[in-house]
Image (cartoon, rainbow, N blue to C red):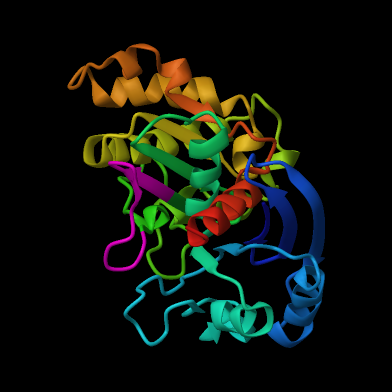
Amino acid sequence: MIYGGIEAGGTKMICVIGDENGRILDRMQIPTKTPEETMPIMIDYFKGKDIKALGIACFGPIDLNRDSKTYGYITSTPKLAWKNYDIVGAFKKELGVPIGFDTDVNGSLLGEITWGCAKGLTDALYLTIGTGVGGGVMAGGKLLHGMLHPELGHIKMAVADGDTYKGKCPYHGTCFEGMAAGPAIEDRWGKKAVELADDDKVWDLESTYIAQALCTYILTLSPQIIILGGGVMHQEQLFPLIRKKVLEQLNGYIVTKELKDIDNYIVPASLNDDQGIMGSIKLAMNADI
């Protein structure tokens, strides 16, 4: 079976053709411009390829409520050209195939659950830390949606002692995203994450905030694994700092086999940055059931 997949991001769109084994057979990448510029190129890519279904792992916020009149829409996005845009409806009209639709981070999590480091688990967290902070959650074998979808980047942080930074988030200031995402690093230190030395003091503070957030998720969501992706997490020196500080902040309150083996509990994404597009293929497979 051949499926289509889209990892729809705020800066780029990745379109792929894949099979039920998660093999990517073909791909195309284009910049995310306006719908009028971007959509015809993507639609033309899939036309004539005889895909059985299409999966879209999409930037948001998006409407995932199938009973809603705006199901399949990108809603209140800061990318104004895409605000209130019916992305599912547009592809459905032109391609006429079943469409699976979810957040970009849930797509990444689905890729890791199906073919990556979380394979076989029922409760997992995927967190991306880059331009923003977003998270996908699987609980009891199901992707977590609820009222909307998790906005894990916007939990409030306890500001570290001596930290006078007011945060970068225009909505919440010192939320997780406001204190630890890529734009906050650049705003605070005057350099992008990739330009900072591996032993720079920024990473000690960065790991403090990431560990604090992970402790909140551990205590509320109880995941069997935590997968960290995104541009900031390409700084591999963060992982040992985060693991150490998670254990310090939990302070022995919970003791599990996963936490005893923390190097295999808090882990980097495992699919060579293809977890999102592989997840979109799985969304298509699920839509075809």
**Residue 259 belongs to the span the image colors magenta:** no
Q: Residue at x 76, y 69 (%)?
A: 46
Q: Is residue 106 above or below residue 256?
A: below
Splitting the image into 4 quarters, where does residue 39 fall?
bottom right
Q: Residue at x 79, y 65 (%)?
A: 49
Does 273 sit left or right of 240 as displayed? right
Q: Nearer the viewer, residue 112 or 200?
A: 112
Give residue 234's position: percent from left, percent from top: 66, 35
Q: Residue at x 33, y 53 (%)?
A: 144
Give residue 158's position: percent from left, percent from top: 30, 45
Q: Is residue 191 above or below residue 146?
A: above
Q: Is residue 228 above or below residue 70?
A: above
Q: Residue at x 74, y 46 (%)?
A: 24
Q: Nearer the viewer, residue 234 or 52?
A: 52
The residue furthest left is: 253
**Residue segment shown in magenta:** 136-149
Q: Nearer the viewer, residue 130 or 148?
A: 148
Any part of residue 47 in sight: yes
Count of labels in the image: 0
Give residue 157's position: percent from left, percent from top: 33, 48
Any part of residue 182 in sight: no
**Residue 142 belongs to the span the image colors magenta:** yes
Q: Is residue 122 above or below residue 25?
A: above
Give residue 17's position: percent from left, percent from top: 74, 55
